Image (cartoon, rainbow, N blue to C red):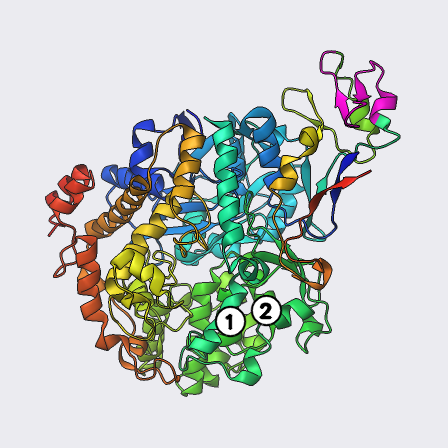
Amino acid sequence: MKKLLVVPNLCIGCRECELMCSLKHYGVFNPALARIRVEYDAEANCYNPVICEQCEDAACVESCPAEAVSRDPQTGVIVIDQEKCTLCLTCVEECPNHAINIAPDGTLLKCDLCGGEPICVQFCSKRPEMSSPLMANPEGATALIVGEK
Amino acid sequence: MHGHGDVVTIDLTHGSIKREPFPVNLAKKFIGGMGINDWLLWNHFLKVDPHIDPLSADNVLIAGLGPLGGTGFGLGSKMKFTYKSPVTGFFGDSTCGGNFGSQMRWSGIDHLVIKGRARKPAYLYIHDSGIEIRDAAHLWGSGTHETIKKLRAGEVPSRAGIVCIGQAGENGVRYACTVATEERAAGRTGSGCVAGSKNLKAIVASGSRGITVSDPEGAVGAARRIFEAIDADPLIFVFKKNGTFNMVDFYDAIGGNAYRNNQLSKVPDERIRFLTSDWYTANMKLRDLACSPGCTFGCDSSCRIKGSETELARRLAGPAGGSPEYLSIASFGMGCDIPDLAAVTHFHRRCNEYGMDFAEVGGIIPLLMELWQRGILTEEHTRKWFGEPLSLEWGNFDAVEKILHAIAFQENELGRICSGNTEKVAEALEKITDLPVTPYMVCGKGGNAFQEEVRSFPIWAVNAAVASRGCDHLKGLNIIDKGFRQDISTEWLGKPDAGVGYTPDLKGAAAALAENYAAAINCLGICIFRPATDPLCMPPSLFTDAYSALTGIPLTPPDLLLAGERACNLEKAFNSRIGLRRGDDRLCARWMDEPVTFEYGAGMKAGEYLDRLLDEYYERHGWDKRTSLQTRAKLDALGLSDVADVLEKEKATA
């Protein structure tokens, strides 16, 4: 099954992933509605994407008192049933990656992997070969990639 | 309306705030960004005398981000400040990356029009529909990094975008800049000085409304086509890897660098090798960074001075932070002859901390050093200024450090002299020394500095002589002659001549076209670095498709180019009202009269071709070549008859 992965040190902080995620799911450019989040680390002056890893032992699934969070047996993607969700935020608190975001209207934003071809990966900036000793990657590498579980 | 946000007018004197919808009838005419900023400036100065002192409360500080800024079209978010410049006394604007502009757009605002003067230090806080004028007493006196740290210590959301001034802006340094999170400056022409004169310490925005899209599927398609064009650019990975650092090596080969106050156009080999991207990557660079949201080029970077790289680095070791760029390398590494990237990085960050344009001070300090070299400034002067003798010899790190501090804090006579632009500094020192100083200043229109060789690259010489905001390369950014791009010349002018290096042929016409083109890109709110310089790799249809999908307003490439031309004409008209004429389109004596000695371009001096190229430039713009003024016919054709009416009344048309 597919999952989203982050290659360390390759994120440039452009937040293109947040912008394209909100465009795909809500038809707007709005990081506040993105299901992925890029965090700035002021001390290291770098950016780190915060992603849902569709965990095997998923704390969000196990902790939900309303049984609103479940894994799609076909795709392996963990989804939130917004009808069942009581907005108690237990999953937000229990997620070890802090990868479930809260929208301005209070509803929850969780990555659904875009059906297997995440738009964030498609628009992640392709980096040059060996841009720095910390970025010792081949030409065209991206910070966000799709891997197999 | 989709894709555009509101225009908010804030009067700091009265504490009033007015929020109005984007003027939809002007969308096609000026698009946004620079175009709408220029329109707002023009309108402001119909009610206010354009001859006012730029530090008057009646000046206006306009902030605007164009419609493709803050979006996912992949070309970044470049916000522009527009005002009457305290550096030159005429039109002023300055652009920065960073995340403030995007947060403003995500709050539903495209433009801020800031008028008046707050009674006490204040900052603006914008959060969607909430706009507050807040007390900034606790921030006054702080540098920009410290200001941001204080604001983020619980006062504003950690993800908020901040733009602020440092001590230079508070203390009236004419070329004080504004600095946006993270470490991006709207450097030129004194936006920070205007903000300081208004007692405005910072503007903070945190937006969660977002930007609505007329045709989301069309927008994904348009973004995909832009990505394909970026991928197909043969130079893209070089730009992504090194950003403006590329220029160090390239200019070294073509004679484009300016060494020791541009006395030479070549930095000695044993020195330039410590200023290159290779040296930087091996010794200091950490990671690539995007300078603004939505920028998938990511030509900025993060670096750390570890302390072991160079002798000076031992004194400068510190945490990770912003990287130097071509202009700071040219200013301090080449101009002051300090071939040490740890030192250059330190000065780059120090200027940002003080909120001071390193391009201008990077012209002033090399001038002081040349005056020392010539014995015009001596120990007698520096003892008087600093209370102890200070050598201004080439390469003196401590001299640069002390001069920057003296300027930012206005702490001695030299600091006060150096608070004006390069020409003002030269004139003041000429009076003090009673010796010739102005022959050695390196500057163009308005007396503003520029640290590149322009004599062998006549389009850039014309740019430096005519730019609406005073000497500068970005108003007409292009790579036609400095990049030898005969293909772009042929596409634009039907002949390759403007792309043939080291000749003046067709360079005036190309300079005019490049101005209109760069202005069009600036109306969109995106980076001009690749989109403006390479219209063949990134044709304008890419941007007009994106704009149409975003807003639902059909826009063609000719529409876009016309909007850019209108913006150029508004800026020209503003300056004409102030009294600028052909005689103000000028270059310094060094560029006019002293020949290039580098192998390529040897013997070239602007005095031999500038007049002819200015004729060509004005003609291509449709302006009168005798006076440089606009004609009614041209303004009518652009749909700017109202502008022509004002100019005619003030006898400022041809």
Quadrant of image for the N terminus of chain B: top left
Position of B54 compared to B642: left or right? right
Q: Are marks 1 and 2 on the same chain?
A: yes
Residue A76 included in the magenta stretch of the image: yes
Q: Is residue A86 above or below residue B404?
A: above
Label placed on residue B248: 1
The residue to which callout 2 is attached is B277
| Chain letter of disc 2 in the image | B
Residue type (three-letter) at the residue carrying disc 2: Ser
Q: Total of numbered circles in the picture?
A: 2
Q: Is residue B502 above or below residue B74?
A: below
Counting from the top left corner in percent of width and height, residue B38 is at 32, 43
Kindly identify the residue that appears in the image at 51 percent across and 63 percent down: B244
Residue B166 included in the magenta stretch of the image: no
Is there CB contact under 8 Å for labels 1 and 2? Answer: yes
Kindly identify the residue that appears in the image at 17 percent across and 52 percent down: B622
Which residues make up the magenta segment? Answer: A60-83
Q: Nearer the viewer, residue B47 or B274?
A: B274
Label placed on residue B399: none
Label 2 neighbour load within 10 Å: few <14, some 14-19, many 20+: many
Q: Which residue is at the far front?
A: A74
Position of B567 compared to A131: left or right? left
Counting from the top left corner in percent of width and height, residue B186 is at 46, 52
Q: CA distance from mark 1 to mark 2?
A: 8 Å
Kindly identify the residue that appears in the image at 52 percent across and 34 percent down: B220
| Chain letter of disc 1 in the image | B
Q: Which quadrant of the view contains residue B44?
A: top left
Mark with earlier residue (1, 2): 1
| Residue B62 visible within the image | no
Q: Which quadrant of the view contains residue B599?
A: bottom left
